[in-house]
Amino acid sequence: MPGKSKKRAVRSFLQVANWKMNKTIREAHEFIKQFMQVHTSSNQAIWFAVPFTDIRSVHDIVQGNFEVGAQNMNDATSGAYTGEIAAQMLLEAGATFVIVGHSERRKYFHEDDAFINRKVLRALESSLKPILCIGETYDEREDKATEAVLEKQLSEGLKGVSSEQIGTCIIAYEPVWAIGTGKTATPEIVEETHASIRNILEKLYDAEVAKEVCLLYGGSVSAVSAQVLSKTPGVDGFLIGTASLDPESFAKIIALSENDLAI
Ligand code: PEP
């Protein structure tokens, strides 16, 4: 593998709100206004993955306090792809990151690892930070296939991503059985699975590089589970769906996760 990226001493916990197909521009403004009133943390990074139509207006009202990104994009730079959106369009609207390979995209829109990989590469080339989502289904966990599934999603999704670029990528471990179901993975499962993801990254890159990759957990994170999960070894942040739709519950999760990560 080519040269190593620089080492960071400390990184802040990363909280990513995934609003999915929720909130009009008006509702997004209302959310941000209320969130600013209840949010108190100063040492965490807070990102909002919003619908395309909200990116510009949320970017303008958060005034650099938080990052705003998209939940999907196409790998093509432009062209006859009705209904799709390109990286440059997101960048010019104010996005700094993009979620790629969310399990809902894999399931409902039949996205495969090769397509997801092309999106990751396009995002990196365009200076958008990709959040690559990976995770096993309930049956795959029951069949003890979790590690094999994650290894495939990582090796195929990160094909062609260099050691320098991997530091810009964020990996979100989202067990499919925990998304939107209210069934949070236990801290033991999260710790064990995050460790195995780091092992896979070590095999794909090396130990130093693997250590630097920001690894999020996602799947029914709530004010009840946030405190314990945020202290679980190997967890660098959360990707939050349902609980990020309400300003108070999102702010509460952030308040309960207050910490700095030494790496
Ligand atoms: C998600 O869809 O990324 C997610 C984690 O959703 P929820 O928090 O609702 O499980």
Image (tube, helix red, strand yellow):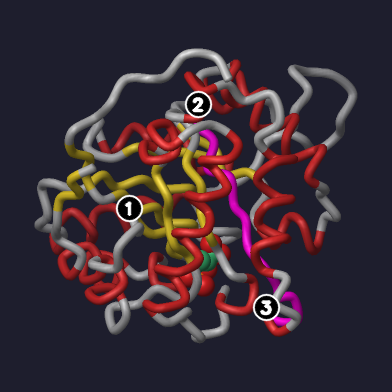
Residue type at tag 2: Ala
- Helix, strand or loop under label 2: helix
The image position of residue 241, as x and y in percent, is 48, 66
Mark yes or no: residue 220 visible: yes
206 relative to 11 in the view: left or right: right
- Name the quadrant of the C terminus: top left
| Observer able to see residue 53 | no
60 displayed left or right of 93: left
User: Residue sitting at 25 percent across and 31 percent down?
Assistant: 64
Who's the residue at 74% across and 50% down the image? 152
Residue lying farthest to the right in this orientation: 80
- Please give the residue where the numbered disc 2 appears in the rendered image: 93
Q: CA distance from mark 2 to mark 1?
A: 27 Å
Q: Secondary structure at mark 1?
A: loop
Q: Which residue is mark 1?
A: 236
Looking at the image, residue 126 sits to the left or right of residue 80; the answer is: left
In front of the other: 59 or 256: 256
